[in-house]
Image (cartoon, rainbow, N blue to C red):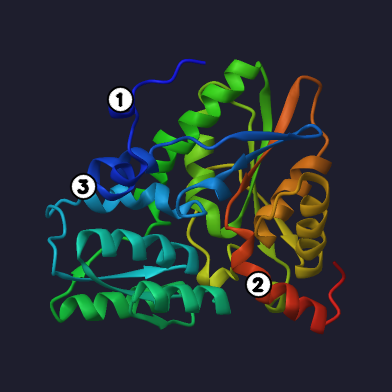
Amino acid sequence: MLRPPPAARPSLEREMVTPTGRQSLLARPTPLLRLGTALLKLEVLRPGAGFDDRALPLWDALPGGEVPAGAQAVFAASAGAALAAAGWARARGVKLTAFVHGALLHEVRETLGIWRLPWEAAPSREAALALAARRAAEGARLLPPLDGPEAAGIFERTLGAELLRDLQEAQLSPALVVAPAGAAAALAGAVRALRPHFPGVQPVLLLPRASGDELPELPMAASAPPIDIPGVRREAVTRAEAAQARAALARELGLLAGHAGALAAQIARRSAVPAGSCAVALVGSAGEREFSLDAANAAAQVPP
């Protein structure tokens, strides 16, 4: 195969460092992987290893203009959103502080330290929003959360548009779209994009059955983002089910996904769908962020 001369080949270093390159990297689509009658949307392969970096353009189009370098800014975040925001803040020189709610594992704490992103833990999403608003009243720029209604519009134009194109090319009709509760904005955006073409598509939101079942991307109600899409079916799941799903996905596909995303994949796979239809699972959160949870599961004798 002929290769272009060196000057014509794109520079990976330039693509990852320049602002234009960052945007093009974030705009790249993620693949669909077939698993039985299910299709897995592999958001785990995003540059930020999850859903949240799709919503970052929200902060570059704020009504008050972009946040300038050196400015103080605050926002309420899940662990995944805090990680996505850390790279955004470093690249722009913004002094960002995150108020983090939901499950916060050792790997996330360490990574936020490496990025030097100041953060404070909050007991709930509402508390995190209140803390961010209080800091904003002292002069910091308040940024909208990456899992709110504004973010759902970005997911509709990106994640949803990608899904629609891929499903139409494959001539498949989605019966279900399954996602964990922490990905509610992504689920809402995806379903909004699909319903004009597939009116019967059913959104399925996974929730922890009890407080001991809370996981990254699978928050309890107090830390769960809102979802603004009609006809949502909610399904309660357990930590043990998620651990089994993660192990099964790794064995069968060699895919190391987060616990909640792996469980979404397995639920999509076992769902009965009409002939010619499929179930879609939104699979986010890098699996290597959850090794400490595997160790905790083993100590608690949660079955793999």
User: Mark 2, residues whose alpha carbon is within 10 Å: few (<14), some, or many (≥20)?
Assistant: many
Contact (CB < 8 A) between labels 1 and 3?
no
Residue picked out by circle 1: 8
In which quadrant of the rendered image does the C terminus lie?
bottom right
Discs 2, 3 touching: Cβ within 8 Å: no
Q: How many numbered markers are drawn?
A: 3
The residues tagged by marks 2 and 3 sit, at their Cα atoms, a distance apart of 33 Å
Q: Is residue 195 visible?
A: no
Q: Nearer the viewer, residue 11 or 95?
A: 11
Determine the secondary structure under disc 2: loop
How far apart marks 2 and 1 lie (CA) works out to 49 Å
Q: Position of residue 214 (x, y in %)?
A: 65, 72
Tell me the mark number nearer the camera, choosing from 2 and 1.
1
Residue under numbered circle 3 = 61
Residue 235 position within the rendered picture, expressed as x and y whole percent measured from the top left: 72, 55
Would residue 26 be found to the left or right of residue 109 on screen?
Answer: left
Q: Amino acid at mark 3?
A: Ala
Query: Residue 30 shows which numbered tag?
Result: none
- Pointer 2: what residue? 214
Instruction: Reply above or below: 135 against 220.
Output: below
Q: CA distance from mark 1 to mark 3?
A: 32 Å
Q: Earlier in the sequence, mark 1 or mark 3?
A: 1
Among the 4 quarters of the image, the one containing residue 134: bottom left
> In the image, what residue occupies the spot 46% across and 29% down?
161
Is residue 164 in sight in this rendering? Answer: yes
Q: Above or below — where is 13 with respect to 39? A: below
Asked if residue 82 lies left or right of residue 217, the reply is left
Along the line of sight, which residue is nearer the eye, 16 or 87? 16
Front residue of 285 and 215: 285
Sooner in the amino-acid sequence: mark 2 or mark 1? 1
